Image: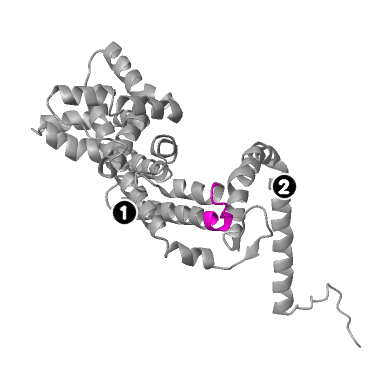
Amino acid sequence: MTTHTTGTPPSVPQPAGARRAGDRSSDAASTARTRRRDLRQNWLGYVFLSPAAILFLMFIGGPFLVAIVLSLYSWDLLTTPEFVGLENFVKLFQDPVLVQAFANTFLFALASVITHVVGALLLALAVNAVASRVISYLVRTAVFFPFIISWAAVALLWQYMLDPGFGLVNHYIERVGLTPPDWFLDPAWALPAIIGIDFWHTLGFTFIIMLAGLQTVPNQLIEAAKTDGASRWQVFWNVTVPMMSPTLFFAMVVTFIGAFQIFDPVQIITGGGPDDATLTLVMYLYEQGFQAFQIGYASAVAFLVFVVIMVVTLLQFWGSKKWVYEQ
């Protein structure tokens, strides 16, 4: 007699490849659902970000891409653009005026970084040591005030102050028995004069940064160093500077980026002269683009400015790993 056994039949095993394909399909569907859920939850954030993104595309990203494209063409704004490939970039390395402008700009930026960082740090240390809040407030206001004045007003002011005929600076130099130079007419003095004017005008910004950085230095570290017998110089060099290193790094980066794009005082005071002694890259870009109508070549100069700033900034970030102290 045959006996029939009742029960659940055994399941048929599926191939391993089919199981993996099913898992991948399930994972993809789950990921898609998660992304849709995140998009629904974060839509308000995208709404708030959209104005900044639109402005970036309109005034930074878009013009940057257009400049790169124009650098491959020869165009005078009147005729049809002519594609020339890398000819404009080859011309960069064969242009002696551009070499002079690059040297002037780099020297100006280097001098600006050194004078601003050192001068602002020393001034911030002096103001921070003042016990009177009233005096400290007055000094901070006086130092920062020139920064809010427009470059046009500052340039006209210092044109008068350094005028060889009736300028106050030359008057007092003569009073002490010295012969004042022709500041903006002598190639040896024109660029140092622009550096000094820029220092007077923009020192307040770096000064405020340094003053804020000093507030982050813990007093207990300074008191501990003094208790151990450290001198003022040792406290400054071994405590204050390391604790302020992120602030110093930020000031160096920002100052170089701003100084390498200097244009206003050069355009207003000297026009790049005398003998191209104060000609800068942005000034040369302006001349090529809006006076000589060499739009393609001006775009190549603009791209060179971008590359130099990017490379120097990356080098600063790379070097910061060796001296910037991260708390």
Query: Which amino acid lies under the numbered mark 2 shown in the image of this protein?
Result: Arg
Q: Residue furthest front?
A: 165
Residue 35 in picture, x, y percent from top left: 70, 52
Q: Does the rendering let one see residue 142?
A: yes
Is label 2 in contact with label 1 (beta carbons under 8 Å)?
Answer: no
Residue placed under numbered mark 1 in the picture: 319
Query: Which amino acid lies under the numbered mark 1 shown in the image of this protein?
Result: Gly
Kindly identify the residue that appears in the image at 22 percent across and 29 percent down: 220
Q: Does the rendering let one see residue 128?
A: no
Q: How many residues crowd around disc 1 within 10 Å: few (fewer than 14), some, or many (20 or more)? A: few
Instruction: Say above or below: 174 vs 28.
Output: above
* In magenta segment, residue 14: no
Q: Residue furthest bottom?
A: 1
Kindly identify the residue that appears in the image at 42 percent across and 61 percent down: 95
- Secondary structure beneath dot 2 equals helix
Magenta-drawn segment? 291-299
Assign the C terminus to one quadrant of the image: top left
Nearest the camera: 5 or 228? 228
Question: Residue 122 is drawn in which quadrant?
Answer: top left
Between the residue at mark 2 and the residue at mark 1, the CA separation in whole angstroms equals 42 Å
Residue 90 in picture, x, y percent from top left: 47, 67
Assign the N terminus to one quadrant of the image: bottom right
The colouring scheme, among rainbow, by chain, secondary structure or one colour, is one colour
Precedes in sequence: disc 2 or disc 1: 2
Residue 306 in picture, x, y percent from top left: 47, 53
Nearest the camera: 175 or 138? 175
Residue placed under numbered mark 2 in the picture: 37
Nearest the camera: 253 or 108? 108
Kindly identify the residue that appears in the image at 46 percent across and 56 percent down: 304
Horizontal side, residue 236 vs residue 116: left or right: left
- Label disc, if present, on residue 157 of the rendered structure: none
Residue 31 in picture, x, y percent from top left: 69, 57
